[in-house]
Amino acid sequence: MATIADEMRLLESSARPLPKEKLTYEQFLEWCDEDTHAEWVDGEVQMTSPVSSEHSDLTRFLTMLLGFFIEARNLGVLHTAPFQMRLREIRRGREPDLIFIATEHLDRIKKNYLDGPADVAIEIVSPDSIARDRGDKFVEYEAAGVREYWMIDPEREQAEFYRLGEEGRYRPILIGREGIFQSQAVEDFYLRVEWLWQEPLPKVATILKEMRVI
């Protein structure tokens, strides 16, 4: 978890001074730009830390793999941070590492944010975000109706997948004996969890051939 000193260094290194007063979400969008990684929490701005090379590599791998699969199957759209996900009812503007929006929900996509829950939100956990990803965001994404929440922690080599049940609660998705996660939100997409920890990461083209996408 980030220390107070870490947070102070983050604020000092930010190219933009933090607003002194609470902002509406529209004001937050005007204040924030493509180079500013921040989230909106009940009117207040929360800056996010720069990512590690490991985090960046894993994000790129999943972006390529999911992005090609979704496009090939015409399932919807994949967006990556800093694209915002606005959760109106709980007054949050979060910035997951990746979000998938199914075709039937494409009307939620605005110019620079998603107005409503994604079908899948993916967070690549880093040391400073672990409490936020496992705590605040878990509760928020569940309450807002994000169908699946994937938490991937490269440092611990741990991946957790949750699906929203009929009662509106997240339930863990069990991984099969072969270590394969099967998504319902991204139809027919599966993930061998061992892929995430390989060094170097596997070739996306090889996986897509296994999936019979190419």
Image (cartoon, rainbow, N blue to C red):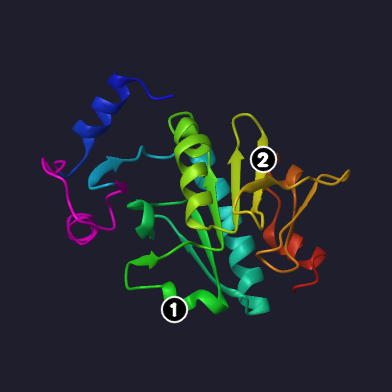
- Give the distance between the C-alpha atoms of the residues marked 2 and 1, in whole angstroms: 30 Å
- Residue that protrudes farthest toward the right in the picture: 177
Number of numbered callouts drawn: 2
In the image, what residue type sits under mark 1?
Asp
Horizontal and vertical percent position of residue 5: 28, 19
Q: Is residue 48 left or right of residue 14?
A: right
Pick the residue in front: 40 or 193: 40
Horizontal and vertical percent position of residue 44: 23, 43
36 part of magenta stretch: yes
* Residue at 27% from the left image edge and 50% from the top image edge: 36
176 part of magenta stretch: no
* Residue at 68% from the left image edge and 44% from the top image edge: 196
Residue count near mark 2 (Cα–Cα under 10 Å), binned few <14, some 14–19, many ≥20: some
| Residue 106 visible (yes or no) | yes
- Which of label 2 and label 1 is nearer to you? 1
Pick the residue in front: 214 or 147: 147
**Region of the chain picked out in magenta, as a range:** 17-41
In the image, what residue type sits under mark 2?
Ala
Horizontal and vertical percent position of residue 74: 63, 80
- Helix or strand or loop: what does disc 1 sit on? helix
Pick the residue in front: 120 or 169: 169
Name the mark on residue 159: 2
In the picture of the structure, the residue carrying the numbered disc 1 is: 107
Which picture quadrant has residue 68?
bottom right
Residue count near mark 1 (Cα–Cα under 10 Å), binned few <14, some 14–19, many ≥20: few
